[in-house]
Image (tube, grey):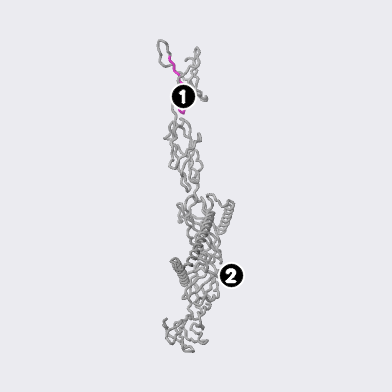
Amino acid sequence: MLGHTESVMTVAFSDEGQRLISAGLENNILVWNISSGEPLRRFYGHDDAIYRVAFINNASGIISCSMDKTVKTWYLTPQPPAPPEKPLVVHKTQCTMLLTWRSPPAFNETITAFRIQWRVGIRQEFGNDITTPGRDFKRTITGLVPGTPYQFRVCAVNRMGVGKWSEPSPQFITEIDVPQPVDRPDVHEVNAHSIGIAWSAPTATVEGSSITRFVIQLAGHGIHFEDGVQQVITWQEARGYHQQFMKRKKAQLDQMAAGGGELMAGDNESILFLKKQARQKRQEMLLRKEKERKEKEKQRELRELMDNPMSPEAIKARAKAKRKEQRRKEREMEQAEAEARGDIVPQGGDSQSGAVEKKDAKAGNMVNLYYLYEGLEPGYEYRLRVAAISGVGQGDWSPTTWSTMTQPTRPVRPNAPEVDMDSVTKTSMMVRWLTPHENGSAVIKFLLKSCHDGHVSKFNHNYTSIRFEDLEPGKSYSFQVQAGNVMGVSEWSKKSTAVKTLTSISERPGRPRIFSSGITWIILHVDRPFDNGARITGFRVQRREISMYHKASWGHEVLVEVPPMRRISSAEDLMLEPPF
């Protein structure tokens, strides 16, 4: 230990003459061993030069006076530190405060650390332990809520233990500005056309800091945050949405309980999460049983090793236990070093539970809020972020939610198919259709219905056109199409525009037969030929005379008309009269 580096203004000897104390412009006191000439202890606590020191109580204590206008008593007998004076806040912002304090008497021991606690207002319990090194007399407290009153207290720690807490500081209120960013919103509901998010925000603690509205901004499906696609809701609306969400969640839980825990596809994501938790509990039970089995096996092996302590297995077991104890001591040393660096160390429990307690204590006035963002497209990934608005203005945006995909649904209703007019013949035509929007799940099939007979044909997703053969000439045809994916099939499209196949002259009639005759007339019977799509309006009849001497050429043509309203049967009787 080094001696003084500044001027010495006062010295004093102990009654037995074995110790010397000195002080001066360095604002600290040194205790010296006269026999060896070495300094034994150094005491801090004055803020200005010390001009008088003396031993008291049979050299068991020291009294000093300083130009800082204080007189201090120092104990040479080791004991925990005294309580510090009330800490003070020398600087504050929206969510931080710079806390300072003075070192208390440490009674012949070096202060190794200071512990700080704080609370909201004056009625809550102190909590949120923070440890800072003993050489520091200030600490910036972060993570505070804007416009909120806080109180602080400090205690000192030395080798002998933890001293008493100081008196609570006066209340200090953080600055009021635009609201701080809220934490990352959590996604709780995912549907085909909506995503539900939840977040927390503080209630007002002083006038002018209350949040009145929230802005929820969307990105995804070709939309960027810079595009400004957003929804604005009030604080009351966000609270109302949260209450509705809790009712829906309770109803789903009741439904799951009534159904024996079985859920159908498409149930809410939070319910599916509960099923996952149930599976984890079953796995934990199996792991616990396996751990008990291994523990029994370990105890059995330990008994065998105790029966033969000099066996190689027993020696290995003792070495393993020694290494385990050494690792435990190393963890304790790391924790002590973390406290000395000023890191936040949870008091009891694991680090995760300590972090949760810290968050709950810091945000004791936080309120749960909710919003269901609707109008989304199925099967696309979206991200959302939230900003709070108060009377001062809009705060910064929260971190965005993790990318979340809306649930897929069956495809949308396709447009009506179309007939390629250039492909129409007497007996065939080409039908084409477009793949509709798939709604998040790829189209895997098409169903095409012929409206004239209701026949449905199935095609895979590679087909968007088909030629229909074996149609009747001159007949109207229309079609409907459906698209399907793994979620189901769409509605039938509208009917396509009716298109007729082409027509042509009728086929050649069959050989006519004489059905009846008279002196001046003949009735012929003829089978009706295929009309090729055009109505038969009449028959042309030719005759020729045949005698035993010669065969005349065809002639004497007669037109026998078929009335428009007459339905032509498969066979026709043709009445031929004079001048025939």
Q: Is residue 488 visible?
A: yes
Q: Residues within 10 Å of mark 1 (few under 14, many from 20)?
A: some
Q: Position of residue 400 (x, y in %)?
A: 47, 58
Q: Amino acid at mark 2?
A: Arg
Q: CA distance from mark 2 to mark 1?
A: 106 Å
According to the image, label 1 marks what residue?
529
Name the residue furthest front. 307
Q: Which badge, 2 or 1, is on the more N-terminal residue?
A: 2
| Quadrant occupied by the N terminus | bottom left
Q: Position of residue 9 (x, y in %)?
A: 45, 86
Q: Identify the image quadrant of residue 4.
A: bottom left
Element type where label 2 sits in the image: loop
Q: Which mark is residue 415?
A: none
Residues drawn in magenta: 529-544
- In the rendered structure, are the residues bearing label 2 and label 1 in contact, judged by CB atoms less than 8 Å apart? no
Q: Which mark is residue 123?
A: 2
Q: Nearer the viewer, residue 94 or 110?
A: 110
